[in-house]
Image (cartoon, rainbow, N blue to C red):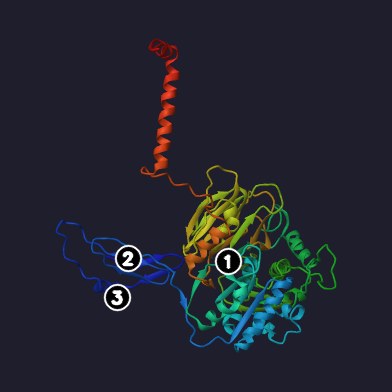
């Protein structure tokens, strides 16, 4: 009947009866097949819509390709961001030369504030972007010039959490697999970039969410106190972390967060066993404000543990029985905390959920930190249990990262056009655990098993390592914001040139061709081989041959 179609995949798309009838009208009934084959329609669904297809008794698929992604400027670019590898005199000299040339082309050059202060302080041709512009670089920069190696490009990717301007990368590092342009010819390639009309490689990135539940960081896990411990001991354990925080725990914010602060300050209960510090005074705990203390403790501990500029924390806690539920989103920038409350679904009493967000251009690696025990990870794809990973770790990589750590762990090299997510185990304790590739629409979840021995760690492009405890989950999906890298020739040409010349893929001496039959040298070799064959036959004859020779004489 199909009056209502419901498709569930990362979301749901519904067609009401009127929409279904409209699609049906657009797909008229085909004449009956003379051979009696039953007619059919296909209902195709994407993340945003679903529609009917009307195949003529055949099911086909049109290949999707991003090979012809080409950029043309509507206006001439006016502002460029220059990212350079630090502590390299040759690159510093090249950065000064390129910035001066760009200024002659009436293009403003921006650099990172620390680069301006430490290396380009006496260079009037460049300016440092302000702290206010740091969070919206994609809105003010037309394209990016990258001077360095692959690691410099990874650093550049981390500066943009969402949209990334086109990036032209000059090879001035060690390997340069992702940097196809020679720095000595920068003027020629920058002129082409300013004119536009160049091809782009859309290098996919991963969006990662670390989800933690509970408020304790002890050896028993993050779900609270050890089994059998009282509620007061759990609260005391949580409160003790406040005294160990490295930075200032400033005003948590307004609305729901302000209520937490007020309740914490006016409580009159038992004090925690550990003494106060000038920066972090003791928090009194009583029945009225226990939940507020737990919420504040969870958020404070998360902020102290991860003080990088690109982490966002979400803490869900019921502030008080009479107050509305809030989702606290705290974005850390330097030493300041900005937050805004939003309405959300109520959580069970005294439960907290902390979420931290990251991006990665190459890969996400979950390993056993520095201990010798096996990793114990439960892996899911779109909510379906996939496998349990026991070994040294697990790599989830993009096609760009397929030639990095994943390749060293036995994963396949994947063309950047392939829409997939690589799933590569590191030294698995199983002979049958082989690498696989998921569709790029998959949402992969990795959970530290309750049976895990010791702590685990997760890293993003080899940096920003975060500890994982029992019950912590890492959710990985393909980001909607790729890194658009300018191609030197084309996407395919640049990629195969890199795997051949830099990774030496399938490099071996070529096999020599065989001699042709009409070649006189070939006839001579045949004659010599015939003579050798006759001599061997005579030797096999032995004494009979010698007797025949003697009688002949």
Instruction: Using the image, determine if residue 386 lies above or below residue 141.
Output: above
User: Could you tell me how far apart the alpha carbons at marks 1 and 2 are, in whole angstroms?
Assistant: 40 Å
Compare marks 3 and 2 and give the one earlier in the sequence.
3
Q: Earlier in the sequence, mark 1 or mark 2?
A: 2
Residue appearing at x 60%, y 89% in the figure? 106
Residue assigned mark 2: 43
Which one is closest to the eye, mark 3 or mark 1? Answer: 1
The label nearer to you, 1 versus 2, is 1
Residue 421 relative to residue 286: left or right: left
Q: Quadrant of residue 501?
A: bottom right
Q: Position of residue 422 (x, y in %)?
A: 52, 57
Residue at numbered disc 3:
18
Query: In the rendered view, does 446 fall on the left or right side of 214?
Result: left
Task: Name the residue at 40% across, 67% down.
Answer: 64
Dot 2: few (<14), some (14–19), or many (≥20) neighbours within 10 Å? few
Q: Position of residue 203 (x, y in %)?
A: 53, 68
Residue situated in front as seen by the camera: 4 or 189? 189
């Amino acid at each position: 009947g199909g009056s209502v179609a419901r498709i569930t995949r990362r979301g749901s798309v519904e067609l009401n009866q009127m929409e279904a009838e409209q699609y049906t009208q657009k797909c008229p009934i085909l004449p009956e097949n003379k051979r009696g084959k039953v007619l059919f329609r296909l209902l195709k669904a994407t993340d945003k819509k679903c529609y009917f297809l009307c195949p003529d008794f055949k099911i086909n698929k049109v290949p999707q390709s991003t090979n012809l992604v080409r950029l043309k400027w509507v206006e001439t670019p006016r502002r460029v961001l220059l990212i350079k590898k630090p502590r390299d005199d040759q690159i510093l000299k090249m950065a000064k030369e390129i910035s001066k040339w760009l200024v002659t082309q009436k293009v403003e050059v921006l650099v990172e504030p620390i680069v301006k202060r430490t290396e380009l302080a006496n260079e009037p041709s460049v300016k440092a972007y302000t702290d206010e512009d740091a969070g919206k670089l994609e809105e003010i920069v037309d394209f990016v010039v990258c001077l360095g190696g692959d690691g410099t490009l990874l650093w550049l990717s981390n500066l943009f959490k969402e949209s990334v301007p086109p990036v032209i990368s000059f090879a001035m590092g060690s390997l340069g697999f992702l940097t196809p342009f020679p720095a000595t010819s920068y003027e020629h390639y920058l002129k082409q970039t300013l004119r536009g009309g160049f091809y782009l490689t859309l290098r996919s990135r991963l969006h990662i969410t670390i989800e933690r539940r509970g408020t304790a960081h002890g050896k028993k896990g993050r779900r609270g106190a050890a089994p059998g411990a009282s509620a007061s001991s759990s609260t005391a354990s949580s409160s003790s972390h406040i005294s160990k925080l490295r930075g200032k725990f400033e005003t948590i914010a307004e609305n729901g967060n302000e209520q937490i602060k007020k309740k914490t300050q006016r409580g009159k209960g038992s004090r925690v066993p550990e003494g106060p510090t000038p920066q972090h005074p003791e928090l009194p705990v009583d029945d009225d404000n226990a939940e507020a203390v737990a919420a504040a403790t969870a958020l404070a501990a998360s902020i102290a543990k991860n003080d990088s500029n690109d982490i966002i924390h979400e803490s869900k806690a019921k502030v008080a029985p009479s107050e509305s539920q809030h989702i606290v989103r705290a974005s850390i920038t330097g030493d300041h905390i900005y937050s805004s409350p939003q309405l959300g679904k109520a959580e069970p009493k005294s439960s907290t959920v902390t979420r931290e967000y990251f991006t990665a251009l190459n890969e996400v690696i979950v390993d056993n930190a520095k201990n010798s025990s096996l990793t114990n990870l439960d892996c899911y794809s779109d909510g379906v249990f996939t496998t349990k990973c026991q070994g040294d770790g697990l790599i989830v990589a993009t096609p760009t990262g397929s030639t990095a750590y994943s390749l060293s762990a036995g994963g396949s090299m994947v063309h950047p056009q392939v829409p997939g997510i690589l799933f590569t185990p590191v030294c698995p304790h199983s002979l049958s655990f082989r690498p696989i590739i998921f569709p790029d629409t998959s949402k992969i979840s990795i959970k530290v098993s309750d049976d895990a021995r010791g702590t685990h760690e997760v890293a993003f492009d080899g940096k920003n390592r975060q500890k994982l405890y029992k019950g912590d989950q890492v959710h990985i999906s393909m980001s909607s914001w790729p890194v658009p890298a300018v191609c030197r020739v084309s996407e395919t040409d640049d990629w195969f040139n890199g795997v051949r010349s830099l990774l030496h893929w399938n490099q071996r001496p070529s096999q020599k061709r065989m001699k042709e039959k009409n070649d006189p040298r070939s006839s001579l070799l045949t004659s010599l081989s015939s003579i050798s064959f006759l001599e061997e036959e005579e030797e096999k004859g032995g004494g009979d041959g010698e007797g025949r020779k003697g009688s002949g004489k």
